[in-house]
Amino acid sequence: LNLAREQARRKVENTATELWYYINARMKELAAASGTGTLNNMVRGMQSDLQGYQTVMTDDFGALREAGGDGELQRKESLRLGNLVQRRLEYLQNPKDCQRAKYVLCDLQKGCGFGCQLHHVTYCLVVAYATQRTLVLHSKGWRYASKGWDSVFMPLSNTCTEVSGSTVHWGVSKSQMDAAKVIQLPIVDSLHPRPDFMPLAIPEDLAPRLNTFHGDPPVWWIGQMVRYLMRPNSHLQEEISSSKQRMGFKGPIVGVHIRRTDKVGVEAAFHGLDEYMQHVDAYFNQREHRESIPQRRVYLATDDPSVLADAKRRYSKYEFISDNGISRSAALGSRYTDSSLRGIILDIHFLANTDYLVCTFSSQVCRVAYELMQTYHGDASAYFRSLDDVFYYGGQNAHNLRAVEPHKAKTKDDLSFDVGDLLGIAGNHWNGFSKGTHRKTSKSGLFPSYKVVNDIVAVKMPTYPEVKE
Ligand code: GDP
């Protein structure tokens, strides 16, 4: 794989995708504005023609990704580098001499849902990796499982699971932190000072390879942390395998996560089932251009039990798969009962194992699934459609975009910038435009999404030379 060629390929694919968002949104406006006469017929004809172009173009990009065996190389490289990260984590987490090892201590009792708590532990593991300190997790009395983390997952360490000795809180002077045996971490919202290695940073020594095979390296990196944390214990593994059998989970399959109940109106807007299914339809239409798909399958995860019946009734062409009993316990999700834990873990596991995700990235449940999904594919960074936010990591350092084209504001809602300028991203409107804040002028505004690329930050972290690839 060649870095320059891969980046050029992804750039043209991204520009084409943003062009499609733009055309699609403008054609809908045109259709609405063109009344019912000849012009309207013309617009509708164009919409249908354009759909054909879009289907073939998406498929062509897929072929280009695979061309000359590059897809296979990409998958192998992702697997190889991922296994290296896993072995580094095993090495870090299993010191030979617990007396001499240094630790970070993390408490699972963050008052929030499973996805949010998992992201809390993920940040702790990132700190552990970047400071080369073994992570110890206090999880007894966990609201999701009173017996703690190990009741579902493999223990984070097989050698050193308790800490004693001089303990300081994160944020005391550097020399005090360096000298301390144990550093206790706060929740990410209270982390001061904020280290430069926090997501969305990636380790400098892995960056050249990671930037070559992956379209969104920070997500892959976070996914590797989640992979280590969510290694199922033998009991959970059995449950996953039997659920897979029982449900008949197999590809090609799209994962749909519909987050409702306590989230709607508070942290996210309501989105109807049709909004999700429109993207599922588009995915299968495009895939059917290449291969015959005897049965369109959707893995449906939701905290609203009424959604599944509604989906089955209204989309009879689809087979909806969902873990029986999960919907019932998911409805209790926000009450954090033990019984809801297996439901949410299985939902995340199966969502991550699909070919494409349709969801709202405002939900940590879907973001965890998307992160984990990266570890199963070579590069799954484009295998999603979020109905609201772009991907983010709660508590992340600034997510910046770098301008690759200049932009002159035409209206007061627009943002002007020059090539090379940094913009903090506020969101993608999925209509060809994104919103951001100019880092130098602090002005906010809209701009065409194709004029920027992600600014990937690589930070020096320990390189674990003891661990060979
Ligand atoms: P967020 O609030 O969606 O960002 O994610 P959190 O994980 O922090 O909290 C939501 C909680 O609601 C989850 O942890 C689950 O307990 C429950 N929940 C939400 N969506 C689902 C789902 O699709 N399946 C299951 N089983 N539970 C869910």
Image: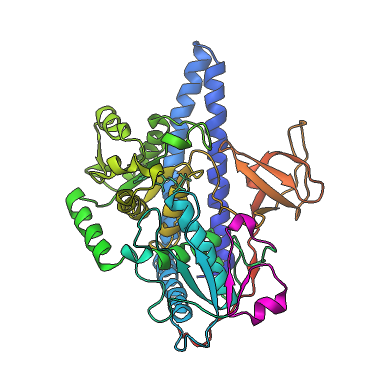
Residue at the spot 43% in from the left edge and 32% down from the top edge: 275
Q: How many marks?
A: 0
Q: Is residue 353 above or below residue 149?
A: above
Q: Residue 210 at x, y = what percent?
A: 53, 68
Evaluate whether residue 68 shows in this view.
Answer: no
Q: In the image, 290: left or right of 205?
A: left
Reply yes or no: does residue 128 show up in magenta.
no
Evaluate whether residue 460 shows in this view.
Answer: yes
Q: Is residue 81 above or below residue 267?
A: below
Q: Quadrant of residue 411?
A: top right
Residue stretch rendered in magenta on the structure: 166-192
Q: Residue 309 at x, y = what percent?
A: 26, 31
Q: Quadrant of residue 161?
A: bottom left
The residue most toward the right is 441
Residue at the spot 53% in from the left edge and 70% down from the top edge: 105
Closer to the camera, 422 or 328?
328
Image quarter (top left, top right, bottom left or bottom right) of the C terminus = bottom left
Q: In the image, 3: left or right of 251?
A: right
Q: Residue 124 at x, y = what percent?
A: 53, 66
Closer to the camera, 354 or 331?
331
The residue most toward the left is 246
Closer to the camera, 79 or 52?
79
Q: Quadrant of ligand 1?
A: top left
Q: Quadrant of residue 212?
A: bottom right
Q: Is residue 56 above or below residue 109?
A: above
Q: In the image, 395: left or right of 95?
A: right
Q: Residue 190 at x, y = what percent?
A: 64, 57
Q: In the image, 23: left or right of 49?
A: right
